[in-house]
Each structure stands twice: as structure tokens, then as C-alpha cells.
Image (cartoon, grey):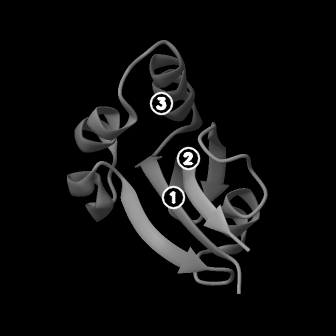
């Protein structure tokens, strides 16, 4: 079974998501941005979600995590929870 590890930042608006993505692309540390801005409890751990398999996350999130290149920040990804920036940190088939 394919497994992935990822971290994310969850915010309420697409605009905020795009601004934070630009900050990260310009050198801001993903984990620091997650701690300061993410509304998910994972923010305490820099947005780290640990390792999980296909189907354990909402479909929109799953689609990104199991197709995006490792180490590249993706988003905004819209789910019922809000807007996410997602970084796949590892994946094994």
C-alpha cells in the first residue's frame, strides 16, 4: 500500500493561502508559517501530519498528496475545512 508523509497549513481564505505560499517561496520556513498561521492542531508540530495511506484524508487532499512531487509546496487546495498548502515530505509505493 502506498504511504505518504506530508505537512500542511490550513487557513480560511484562498487569498491568505496564496500570500503564505508566496512567503514560503520567498524563503519563509514552512514549519514556522504553519505554527503562526494554520488553524489545524497539527500547527503545533509545524503542520506535520505524519504518515498515512490513500483514503485516510479527504479526497481533494489525497489527490495532491499521492500525485505531487516530494518537497514542492502545493496549493491552494480547497477542502470542506478551508484552504491548504500541502508539502509531501516522503512517499513510498
From the top left corner, tell me how far across and down residue 55 is, in percent: 67, 84
Identify the disc placed on residue 16.
3
Labels 3, 2: front one: 2
Lateral position of residue 36 relative to residue 19, left or right: left
Lateral position of residue 69 relative to residue 16, left or right: right
Work out whether mark 1 precedes mark 3 in sequence or the reverse, and give the earlier one: 1
The reply to whether the C-beta atoms of the residues labelled 1 and 3 are less than 8 Å apart is no
Mark 2 to mark 1: distance in Å? 6 Å
**Relative to 7, residue 34 above or below:** above
Furthest residue toward front: 92
**In the image shown, does 10 or 88 lie closer to the viewer?**
88
Q: Mark 1 points at which residue?
A: 6
Quadrant showing the N terminus: bottom right
The reply to whether the C-beta atoms of the residues labelled 2 and 1 are less than 8 Å apart is yes
Q: Within 10 Å of the Cα at label 3, are there few (<14), some (14-19), or many (20+) other Cα atoms?
A: some
Lateral position of residue 70 relative to residue 51, left or right: right
Mark 1 to mark 3: distance in Å? 20 Å
Identify the disc placed on residue 87.
2
Labels 1, 3: front one: 1
From the top left corner, tell me how far across and down residue 65 is, in percent: 67, 60
Q: Which residue is drawn at 64% across and 41% down?
A: 75
Q: Within 10 Å of the Cα at label 1, are there few (<14), some (14-19), or many (20+) other Cα atoms?
A: some
**Relative to 48, residue 2 above or below:** below
Work out whether mark 2 precedes mark 1 in sequence or the reverse, and give the earlier one: 1
Amino acid at each position: 500500500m502506498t504511504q505518504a508523509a506530508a505537512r500542511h497549513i490550513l487557513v480560511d481564505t484562498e487569498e491568505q493561502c496564496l500570500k503564505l505560499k508566496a512567503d514560503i517561496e520567498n524563503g519563509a520556513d514552512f514549519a514556522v508559517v504553519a505554527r503562526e498561521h494554520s488553524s489545524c492542531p497539527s500547527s503545533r508540530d509545524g503542520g506535520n501530519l505524519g504518515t498515512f495511506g490513500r483514503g485516510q484524508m479527504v479526497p481533494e487532499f489525497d489527490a495532491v498528496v499521492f500525485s505531487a512531487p516530494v518537497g514542492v509546496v502545493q496549493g491552494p487546495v480547497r477542502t470542506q475545512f478551508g484552504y491548504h498548502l500541502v508539502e509531501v515530505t516522503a512517499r513510498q509505493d
